[in-house]
Image (tube, rainbow, N blue to C red):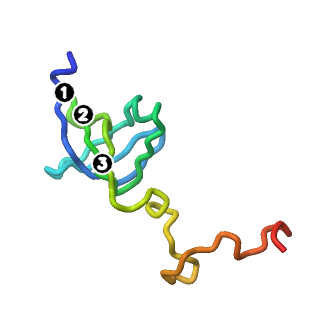
Amino acid sequence: MSKEELLQFEGLVLERMPNARHLVQLDNRHRLVAYTAGRMKKNRIKTLAEDRVTVEVSLCDLEKGRLIFRHRTNEPLWSRGSRNAVNSAGDDAEFDYFSKDVAGVHP
């Protein structure tokens, strides 16, 4: 099978899975498991949940794919995912990492 026989779809990452795999829902509501392409690993492109991606899918197996492109978003990477800017009280104020004394490191 040559590379010309691959299908390309756009979708949304629903969940990160172990071993650089992602659960992706395509725009046509089809779900598949996709792994990160080597070019994305080499350039250290990180993919988080709720990212828009382009997926290559083989005609032989429509349940597996390869992430080949992560589309840009308007918000910075550090403000997405599990490191959001909400502190433990649930306020929308910016989280201060140095607010608590950690083993006597900060006076």
Question: How much space separates mark 1 and mark 3, taking CA atoms?
Answer: 20 Å
Tag shown at residue 6: 1
Q: Secondary structure at mark 1?
A: loop
**Reading the chain from its start, which is encountered first: label 3 or label 2?**
2
Residue at the spot 38% in from the left edge and 53% down from the top edge: 15
Q: Nearer the viewer, mark 3 or mark 2?
A: 3
Q: Position of residue 66 (x, y in %)?
A: 31, 34
**In the shown orientation, is residue 104 left or right of residue 26?**
right
Q: In the image, is 8 to the left or to the right of 48?
A: left
The residue type indicated by label 3 comes to His
Is disc 1 in contact with disc 3, using a CB cutoff of under 8 Å?
Answer: no
Q: Nearer the viewer, mark 1 or mark 3?
A: 3
Dot 3 corresponds to which residue?
71
Q: Could you tell me which quadrant the C terminus lies in? A: bottom right
How far, Cα to Cα, is label 3 from label 2? 14 Å
The residues tagged by marks 2 and 1 sit, at their Cα atoms, a distance apart of 6 Å
Q: Position of residue 26 (x, y in %)?
A: 21, 48
Q: Quadrant of the N terminus?
A: top left
| Mark 2–mark 1 CB contact (< 8 Å) | yes
Image quadrant in which you'd find residue 9:
top left
Is tag 1's residue or tag 3's residue first in the polypeptide sequence? 1
Placement of 64 over or under 87, stated as above or below: above
At label 1, counting other C-alpha atoms closer than 10 Å, the crowd grade (few under 14, some 14-19, many 20 or more) is some
Give the residue type that dot 1 points to. Leu
Task: Name the mark on residue 99.
Answer: none
Tell me what residue is drawn at x 26 percent, y 42 percent: 54
Q: Is residue 61 above or below residue 3?
A: below
Disc 2 target residue: 56
| SS of the residue under disc 3 | loop
